[in-house]
C-alpha cells in the first residue's frame, strides 16, 4: 500500500517542479521592444491599422539590399561556398574591409586587426567578455542599445550616464568623468541607437582626451580603460552632419579603441549577418578565441559576396546616395509634422534628424486624461494610448535604460511607407486633441 502511494506521489501530474537555472538566466531582463512587438503583431492579426515605427530593421520591399550584393551572394552559393569560414573571417574579406576603411574613412587597419562575425552583436559580446571581469566598472550612456544587458552578462558594475535632450542625448566628457576612475569599458555609439544623433567633433575629442589622460595615470599592473565604439550607422548621416571617430581625431586612441561595424544597417542587410570589429591585435585575438567556442561566424557565401561588393566603390556610393535620400525624406517629413503639431500647442517635440534611421520624438502627456476620463498616470500609459488610440507604435526611451518617466521615444523609419506619413500625423493629432 505504501509503495502504491509513493508511486502516486511521484507521478508527473503530482510533482511541483522547482527548477533552478543559472543566476544569469534567472536575472536576465526581457526586451521591452520584443514585448511591444508581440502586442503590435496581435493588433495587426486582429485587423487593426498600426503604424509600426518600432523595429530597427528594414522592410525589404521598401529598402532592398544593393542589387550588386544580392548578385554576389547568389553567385557565391552557386560556386558552393558553403563550408566553414576562417575563425577570424576569410582573408579576402578582411583585406576588402581594410581597403574599404582606408578609402571611405581614412582608418588604417591590417588584417590581423580585423575580426569578422555574424553581425555586430557577437563581437560586442566577445569584447565585453575579453575586457571585463565580475565587478569591473562599465560606463555607458542611457538611452542606448543593449549596453545594460552586456554589462549584466559579465556581472559588471553598471555606471549609467543619463544623457540629456540639451546634448541631443549624447554623453559628454563631464557626464562621464565622475565614473572614469577604475572603469575598464566606456561604451560609445555614434550615430546613436536609439536617438539617431551624433557626437560633435569637440565633444568626442574631449572624451578621447579624458580617456588618454586616465590611461596614462594608471600604473603598470592596472587594467586600462578601453572604448567600444559602435559606428554601425556611420555611413547614414543626413544633411551637413559629419561622422567622427576616436582614432581619426586622436591617433593615440588606436591602442584603446575597438570599433564595431557591419553591412547590417548601411546596406539594409540586417539578415545577411556580416559584421566586423577593428582594434588592437592582442584584443582581436582574444575575441577570436571566445567566438571560436561560440561559433558565431558570418556564413561563408555571404563573406565571399561582401568581400567582392565592398570594393565596388561606385556601386556602394550609388546605393548609399539613393538609400540616404529615401531615409532622410521620411525622417524630415515626420519631423516637420511633429513641429507643426508642437506649434499648434500639442504636447510633442522632436530633435531634427541627424543620422541613422531614427528620429527622437517626445510625447509629454502624463497627467492628462483620455476622453473616457482615464488618467495617463505613467509614461507607459502614454505609450499604450498612442498604440490603442492612434495606432502608432514607437519605442520608449525607458526601453533603452532611460528613466521610467522619460517622455522621449525612438521612431524608426526602416519600414515606413512615405504615403502613410500624413495619415499617421493626423492620427496622432486626433488622439492628442482628445486629451484634457
Image (cartoon, rainbow, N blue to C red):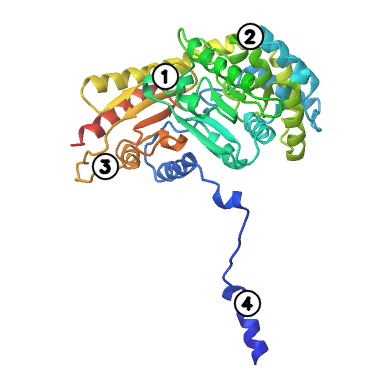
Quadrant position of residue 17: bottom right
Of residues 436 and 45, the one nearer the viewer is: 436
Nearer the observer: mark 4 or 3; the answer is: 3
Which disc is residue 376 wearing?
3
Which disc is residue 104 wearing?
2
Q: How far apart are the two marked residues, 2 and 3, measured between alpha carbons?
A: 48 Å
Residue tagged 4: 11
Q: Secondary structure at mark 3?
A: loop
Where 309 sits versus 88, above or below? above
Of residues 189 and 387, the one nearer the viewer is: 189
Q: Is residue 97 left or right of residue 53?
A: right
Quadrant position of residue 410: top left
Work out whether mark 1 precedes mark 2 in sequence or the reverse, and give the earlier one.
Answer: 2
Q: How far apart are the two marked residues, 1 and 4, measured between alpha carbons?
A: 60 Å
How many labels, in total?
4
Q: Secondary structure at mark 1?
A: helix
Residue tagged 1: 330
Amino acid at each position: 500500500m505504501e509503495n502504491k502511494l509513493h508511486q502516486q506521489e511521484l507521478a508527473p501530474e503530482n510533482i511541483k517542479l522547482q527548477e533552478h537555472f543559472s543566476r544569469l538566466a534567472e536575472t536576465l531582463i526581457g526586451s521591452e521592444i520584443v514585448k511591444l512587438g508581440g502586442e503590435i503583431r496581435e493588433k495587426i492579426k486582429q485587423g487593426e491599422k498600426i503604424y509600426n515605427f518600432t523595429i530597427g530593421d528594414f522592410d525589404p520591399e521598401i529598402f532592398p539590399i544593393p542589387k550588386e550584393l544580392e548578385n554576389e551572394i547568389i553567385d557565391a552559393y552557386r560556386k558552393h561556398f558553403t563550408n566553414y569560414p576562417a575563425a577570424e573571417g576569410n582573408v579576402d574579406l578582411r583585406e576588402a574591409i581594410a581597403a574599404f576603411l582606408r578609402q571611405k574613412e581614412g582608418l588604417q587597419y591590417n588584417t590581423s586587426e580585423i575580426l569578422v562575425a555574424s553581425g555586430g552583436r557577437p563581437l560586442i559580446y566577445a569584447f565585453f567578455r575579453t575586457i571585463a571581469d565580475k565587478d569591473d566598472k562599465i560606463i555607458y550612456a542611457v538611452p542606448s542599445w543593449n549596453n545594460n544587458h552586456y554589462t549584466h552578462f559579465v556581472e559588471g558594475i553598471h555606471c549609467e550616464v543619463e544623457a540629456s535632450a540639451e546634448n541631443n542625448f549624447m554623453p559628454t566628457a563631464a557626464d562621464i568623468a565622475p565614473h572614469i576612475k577604475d572603469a575598464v569599458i566606456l561604451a560609445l555609439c555614434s550615430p546613436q541607437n536609439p536617438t539617431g544623433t551624433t557626437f560633435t567633433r569637440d565633444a568626442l575629442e574631449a572624451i578621447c582626451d579624458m580617456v588618454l589622460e586616465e590611461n596614462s595615470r594608471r600604473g603598470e599592473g592596472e587594467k586600462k580603460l578601453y572604448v567600444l565604439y559602435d559606428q554601425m550607422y556611420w555611413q547614414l548621416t543626413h544633411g551637413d552632419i559629419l561622422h567622427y571617430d576616436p582614432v581619426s581625431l586622436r591617433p593615440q586612441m588606436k591602442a584603446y579603441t575597438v570599433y564595431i561595424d557591419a553591412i547590417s544597417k548601411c546596406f539594409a542587410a540586417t539578415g545577411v549577418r556580416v559584421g566586423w570589429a577593428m582594434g588592437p591585435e592582442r584584443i582581436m585575438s582574444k575575441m577570436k578565441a571566445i567566438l571560436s567556442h561560440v561559433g558565431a561566424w558570418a556564413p561563408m557565401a555571404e563573406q565571399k559576396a561582401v568581400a567582392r561588393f565592398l570594393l565596388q566603390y561606385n556601386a556602394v556610393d550609388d546605393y548609399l546616395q539613393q538609400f540616404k535620400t529615401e531615409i532622410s525624406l521620411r525622417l524630415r517629413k515626420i519631423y516637420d509634422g511633429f513641429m507643426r503639431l508642437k506649434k499648434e500647442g500639442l504636447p510633442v517635440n522632436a530633435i531634427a534628424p541627424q543620422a541613422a534611421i531614427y528620429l527622437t520624438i517626445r510625447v509629454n502627456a502624463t497627467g492628462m486624461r483620455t476622453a473616457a476620463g482615464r488618467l495617463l498616470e505613467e509614461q507607459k500609459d502614454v505609450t499604450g494610448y498612442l498604440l490603442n488610440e492612434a495606432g502608432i507604435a514607437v519605442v520608449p526611451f525607458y526601453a533603452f535604460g532611460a528613466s521610467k518617466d522619460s517622455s522621449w521615444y525612438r521612431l524608426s523609419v526602416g519600414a515606413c511607407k512615405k504615403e502613410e506619413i500624413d495619415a499617421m500625423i493626423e492620427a496622432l493629432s486626433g488622439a492628442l486633441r482628445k486629451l484634457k
